[in-house]
Amino acid sequence: MSDAGETGGEDADDRGIKAGVERSSGDPRVLFAMNAVLSALLASTVVWGLDLLGAAAYTLRNVATLTLIVFAVTYAAVLR
C-alpha cells in the first residue's frame, strides 16, 4: 500500500502544520485563543518554577510578559 494514496500525492515537505492551517476551513480565532491559553499556562508554570528556584518573582507582570513572548514566538514560528 502506497503513502501517495493516503496523502493525496503530496510530497513529504508539503505536509506540516503550516500547510494544514492554510488549508483549514476553521475559524482562526479558535487557534489564536488556544495559543493564548496554552501560552499562559506554560508561562505560569515557568514563572512558578523560577519563583521556586528564587530566580524570579511569581507576579502577574512576569507571567503576562512571558505569555506575550511565548505567544509571539509561537505565532511567528507556526503561522507565518
Image (cartoon, rainbow, N blue to C red):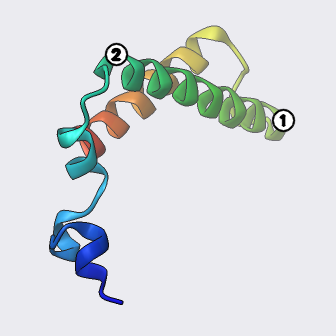
Say what amino acid the circle numbered 2 marks. Answer: Arg
15, above or below 64, in the image: below
Residue 44 in picture, x, y percent from top left: 67, 26
Q: What residue lies at 84% left-to-right and 35% top-to-bottom?
A: 52
Taking the image as shown, residue 10 lies to the left or right of residue 29, namely: left
Q: Residue furthest top?
A: 60
Taking the image as shown, residue 15 lies to the left or right of residue 69, namely: left
Quarter holding the C terminus is top left
CB under 8 Å between discs 1 and 2: no
Taking the image as shown, residue 23 lies to the left or right of residue 39, namely: left
Q: What residue lies at 68% left-to-right and 13% top-to-bottom?
A: 59
Taking the image as shown, residue 44 lies to the left or right of residue 29, namely: right
| Residue behind mark 1 | 52
Residue 31 in picture, x, y percent from top left: 39, 26
Q: Identify which residue, 31 or 46, lies in the foreground.
A: 31
Q: Identify which residue, 48 or 42, lies in the foreground.
A: 42
Circle nearer the N terminus (1, 2):
2
Could you tell me which secondary element the residue under label 1 belongs to? helix
Quarter-wise, where is residue 47 in the image?
A: top right
From the viewer's perspective, is the residue at label 1 or at label 2 nearer?
Answer: 2
Say what amino acid the circle numbered 1 marks. Answer: Leu
Residue 78 in picture, x, y percent from top left: 29, 44
Mark 1 → mark 2, Cα distance in angstroms: 34 Å
15, above or below 44, in the image: below
Please tell me how crowded label 2 is: few (under 14), some (14-19), or many (20+) other residues with Cα within 10 Å. Answer: few
Could you tell me which secondary element the residue under label 2 belongs to? helix
Q: What residue lies at 27% left-to-right and 48% top-to-bottom?
A: 20
| Residue behind mark 2 | 29
